[in-house]
Amino acid sequence: MDKRNAKKVVAFPNLKVRLIEKATEYMQQKKFHEALPLFSQAYELDELNAEALLGMVICHFELHELEEAKTYSHKMLQEDVGDYYHNLQVHLMILIQLGEYEEGYKMLEAVIQEEQLPAEHAEQFYRLLQFCKARIHEEEIPDEQDEAEQLNQLQTLVAENDIHKQMEMIQSLKHVRLEKHLVLLKELLVHKTIHPIIKTLAVKTLMEEKVDVDLQVCKFDRSIKVNPIHLNEMMPYPLAIKVENKLKERLEQDNPMLLEVAIELWHRHLFLLFPFLPIQQDENLLTASIHYISLHLQGEEIEVETIGDLYDVNLSSLKQLVSDIQELEEISFL
């Protein structure tokens, strides 16, 4: 045998796939010791395989081998393997477990300043930012403020026009009694220049804390009176579920990647509007619009008439709704 070829390893067909499948089976059974070497073998065959890398991260984490988990989660971020925001969240949780709050804070700060955060991820990352900041400085978040102080705080936030500071302020209120900051929150929810996503997060924070008070919310030239407790009872909205189900019926079998983009777009749109629902309540029109915009987000050129025929909807109404959703999509990232 040629010595140059003596050490070459020829993998069996589909070996990587079978290794990952068996490792995943072990992992689902909480057998992390058994799963890890299989994920490692798959990683040796393909060092940029997202499933193998994520499996190794999870196994190392569950086995309390945090430094190893950190090494591989960092590699996933550096090499842009898999879902970036999911990987970032996993990496940050590892840093927090290691007590490396300053590194986590700096990473979050850089991402928030340089990236356009999807709205559905923004709240979680700002919450982690606030947690890391509090642990670094061991600072006590101020307790209740009087009405004048709250109004001054809002005026300062509006004058600075810094959406990230507004986000941090909302997150900081989770550490205090929200009932003592209602003057600030009530004014924020009706103020014309406060970003719609900040208002969404303010309402959701009140819902989480089960604050029982009527509040006026103004967005996109619309106004509504809501009670956070009653909003909790109404969630999830039936319309949101129906449109998502229609997207699944249409795309799940033929184009699961497009379905993922479409559902993310739909959730982002609802998050931006919350607590309002879309003015257009026609399920077919909404589904058709999300389908069409998702195709374009993936770089696929298709005539709007084709989607209109597919869903049997009025073409003029479809074009208008597509335009309305795309206009809001432009401000749905922070």
Image (cartoon, grey):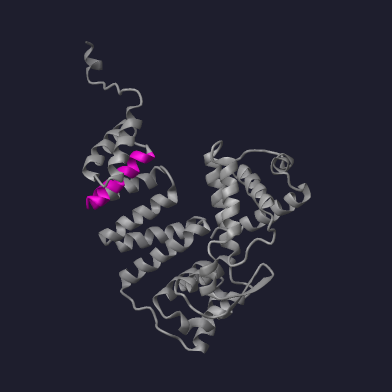
In the image, 265 versus 161, the foreground residue is 265
Q: Main secondary structure of the magenta part?
A: helix
Q: Residue furthest top?
A: 1
In the image, 305 versus 125, the foreground residue is 305
In the image, 255 versus 219, the foreground residue is 255
Picture coordinates of residue 304, whole percent (x, y): 72, 43
Picture coordinates of residue 12, whole percent (x, y): 31, 22
Left or right relative to 133: residue 250: right
Q: Is residue 298 visible?
A: no
Seen at 48% across and 82% down, the residue is 181
Seen at 39% across and 75% down, the residue is 175
Write down the quadrant of residue 302 in the picture.
Answer: top right
Picture coordinates of residue 55, whole percent (x, y): 32, 43
Left or right relative to 266: residue 25: left
Q: Confirm whether the magenta stretch covers residue 55.
A: yes
User: Which quadrant: the N terminus?
Assistant: top left
Q: Is residue 146 shown above or below 311?
A: below
Picture coordinates of residue 289, whole percent (x, y): 67, 49
Seen at 29% across and 38% down, the residue is 23
For the magenta stretch, what is the residue range? 50-68
Write down the quadrant of residue 14 in the picture.
Answer: top left
Q: Confirm whether the magenta stretch covers residue 225.
A: no
Write down the quadrant of residue 177 in the picture.
Answer: bottom left
In the image, 232 versus 170, the foreground residue is 232
Left or right relative to 99: residue 189: right
Q: Is residue 264 visible?
A: yes
